[in-house]
Amino acid sequence: MKVLKDLLVIWKTLVLISVPLLASPILSINGSKELACLYGVIIVSAFWITEVLPLPVTALLPIVIFPLLGVLPAKEVALSYVKDVSMFSFSCLSFALCIEKWHLHRRIAIKTLLCMGTSPKWLTLGFMLPTWFLSLWINNTSATAMMVPVVMAVLDQLHKLEASSIELNTFEEPASEVISQNNDQKQAIKKYIDNEAFHYPNKEYKQMCKLLNLCVCYSASLGGIGSITGSSTNLIMQGQSDAIFESYGLQSGVNFLSWFLCCCPVAFLCLILMWLWLVFHFLGFRELTSWKCGDSVKNESLKAVLRTHLEEMGSLSFAETAIIGHFIILLSLWLSMKFPGGVGWSLWFRPEFVNNSTPGIILLLSLFLFPSEKPKIFCRQNANNTSLDENILYRPVPALLEWKNIQDHYPWGTWCLLCGGYAIAHICQESGLSLWIATQLSVFSNMQPWIMLFILTLIISFMTEITSNAAMISILCPILAELALSMQMNPLYLLLPATLACSLAFMLPVATPPNAIVFAIGHIKVKDMVKAGLVLNFLCLIMINIATNTWMTAILDLNVIPPVMNRQLNLSHAFVNTTK
């Protein structure tokens, strides 16, 4: 027993040593570049899954491993870390940081809640909608962390209301009823005290605690799939699909607008399914079919709590107004850059000279320049005090975003993980490993495409419960692309739904940071998350597969393989046959 305890202390060191040793026989099979690449991918994947090293640190290993194995030179590996999509992700994460700095996201969430009723069903939707909307643009973890204090405040007020109703029911009954029921009430109160009375005055409140916590973390994960900026997995997929299509001299067609048109409806429909399922699962069919707006006393009490939070923030500041203006401009530039049919403002420039990163960086530079306060020099002077203090008048006004904010709070680890994913994809493609693995998956060639797609997304959604989403899609993208090409399918037919499936991590606390945040509060047990998340996984997978075979196919022509790809694929097959 003591030996096991000692081994648990050094388990990370054991994994670091044992994985390269156990995988080393792969190098002695035939000395091919593909198997050397496979050896390196196994090491990086094992370290990502076990997290024996921090994920961003593991993302830097390809710069060392693959040149030493003779797969690709270090210069080429290093260049694959920084792409156009890397700068796009930098601008998105920085803009989200600016929104969080001025607490604009919290104001949006509280105002949305004030518009909803206090019936458990509508209160749940009131928490889900702002969390979902905010996670389209900012980090899922940040959206969850921002909403959790609001959830706790509402639950605390509900606890007081439920406790007071129990007290009234217990001590304000007519004297005759009190005497006849005295013993039963004492036993009931004792039972509450013995069984988490201070947390759960009744079963309904206990279920509400679970419901509101889970709806927040699940909504944050779903919002991440609706926008290309919503999740790191989306950015990785865009970068890798661009690289795959560029190798054939083509454009992938995956940009901010096309992703929004394809995936935002999926995210919203999944949100509605999630709302209906969670309300049914925790509160029952009666609450689901009830259309009441809530008790008036409870309604006013909860609104008072939310108004208190809003009053603490004060009125809408100049900085928040400026950020809203920047956001509208940025969103307009992204959406109008390239419309379907080949029109958009990007046509004013040379082809492919501007991309999603261009407006992102322009607006980011503006955030570093735009003042966070209205400069005093533009303020009208007071008639009673015509001369303002010169120190106040000429005081430097801080910008909306300062480099110190980036330096201290920017998620550099996430950025390193994104870049590491691009590097892994490039290495797998250039070494031929992705093509080799795709040929080993020929078992799927006899299936109908929609059946194969459902099986793949189902496997991915369960695998992502125990692995990093970004690491998962980084490894799978080149493999799935080659699998699609070997079956003469458009690579995006597999890449897009596989990326969405990576965000369906609803069953375990360790699956995503939002899950871990709400689990740490204490209201949720693992079995609660598994029961609710298992059904939710299947519902969302069905919706993703329906979307892929309907409007996504119509928007991106997923049922058609580009002629250039098909022609080059046939030439490569002919060359292989003649050399045998």
Image (cartoon, rainbow, N blue to C red):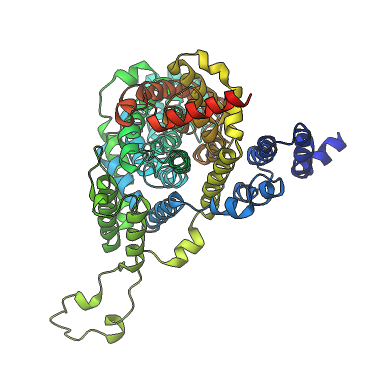
Residue 57 in the image: above or below residue 530? below
Would residue 97 appear left or right of 415 to someone viewing this image?
Answer: left
Q: Residue at x 24, y 37 (%)?
A: 341
Would residue 61 appear left or right of 498 to someone viewing this image?
Answer: right
Residue 4 percent coordinates (x, y): 83, 35
If the image is split into quadrants, where does the C terminus sit?
A: top right
Residue 36 percent coordinates (x, y): 70, 39
Residue lying at the far front in this picture: please name it: 578
Q: Is residue 165 visible from the viewing direction of this image?
A: yes
Residue 290 percent coordinates (x, y): 28, 20
Residue 127 in the image: above or below residue 72? above
Residue sitting nearer the eye, 242 or 213: 242
Residue 420 in the image: above or below residue 274? below
Q: Quadrant of residue 359?
A: bottom left
Q: Is residue 201 visible from the viewing direction of this image?
A: no
Q: Residue at x 36, y 16 (%)?
A: 285
Q: Quadrant of residue 231?
A: top left
